[in-house]
Image (tube, rainbow, N blue to C red):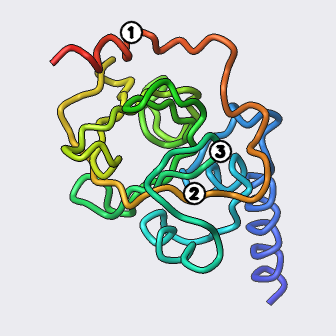
Amino acid sequence: MRVLVRSVACFLALAVASAAPAASLLDYVGQCVPFARQASGIQIYGDAWTWWSQADGRYDRGRKPKVGSVIVFPKSDRLRLGHVAVVSRIVEKRVLMLTHANWSRLNGKRGHAEQDVTIFDVSPGNDWSTVKVWFRDTDGLGGTVYPVAGFIYGEKPPARELTGRDPDYVASLIDAYVR
């Protein structure tokens, strides 16, 4: 019994230590959901694809992006648990920048936070229902079109580190307009 209690105590100590918050939002390594919650202040839990329905009646939702809002990607073949990210900049009507975690590989590993990542609205109705997202692994928007459930609007100001002074993804903006 003592061995079991000691093992459980060690496991809990490791779990708490590994769940400690990063010194900076951008130092975060992990899943998209805790990152989006921390960056936006929106207190929803569970898989990313469930955020849209969970927000109903708790937070305002819509199709218009706003800085600090969370964009929700539903479940798909490529996103089995969905994905959530926080809008960091509105560049123009069909181009945004997101700050999110666990999208591209950095140094060969997933989970890292990425600041000011370009996203392009490719929906026929200009309503943000389908998008292409900058993918660092290919240094471009890639060919995948992702469905979007919509945007969840928080009640608190987003994290200060949501956007940088000089986004380094300007090439992706050019890529967005080259068809």
Left or right: residue 110 versus residue 115 is left
Left or right of 75 on screen, residue 99: right
Q: Residue at x 69, y 61 (%)?
A: 42
Q: Earlier in the sequence, mark 2 or mark 3?
A: 2
Considering only order in the chain, which callout, 1 or 2, is on the residue closer to the N terminus?
A: 2
The amino acid on which the numbered mark 3 sits, given as a three-letter code, is Gly
Name the quarter where the C terminus is drawn: top left
Q: Please state the horizontal and vertical placement of residue 27, each as a whole percent of the image.
A: 70, 32
- Residue 33 got which mark? 2
Give the residue at mark 3: 68
User: Which is nearer the N-term, disc 1 or disc 3?
Assistant: 3
Q: On the rendered structure, is 120 left or right of 98?
A: left
Q: Measuring 30% from the left and 41% from the top, which residue is drawn there? A: 131
Q: Secondary structure at mark 2?
A: helix
Report which quarter residue 23 is drawn in. Answer: top right
The amino acid sitting under disc 1 is Ala
- List x then y, in percent, for residue 14: 76, 58
Compared to residue 89, the image places residue 32 above or below, namely: below
Specify the quadrant of the image occupied by residue 44. bottom right
Which residue shows up at 56% across the image and 40% down it? 87
User: Badge 1, how many Cα within 10 Å: few under 14, some, many 20+?
Assistant: few
Secondary element at image label 1: helix
Q: Give the spatial CA distance, label 2 vs label 3.
A: 15 Å
Instruction: Using the image, tell me which numbered label, if any, was put on residue 171.
Output: 1
| Left/right of residue 4 with respect to residue 57 in the rendered view | right
Instruction: Decide: is 171 above or below 161.
Output: above
Which quarter shows the N terminus? bottom right
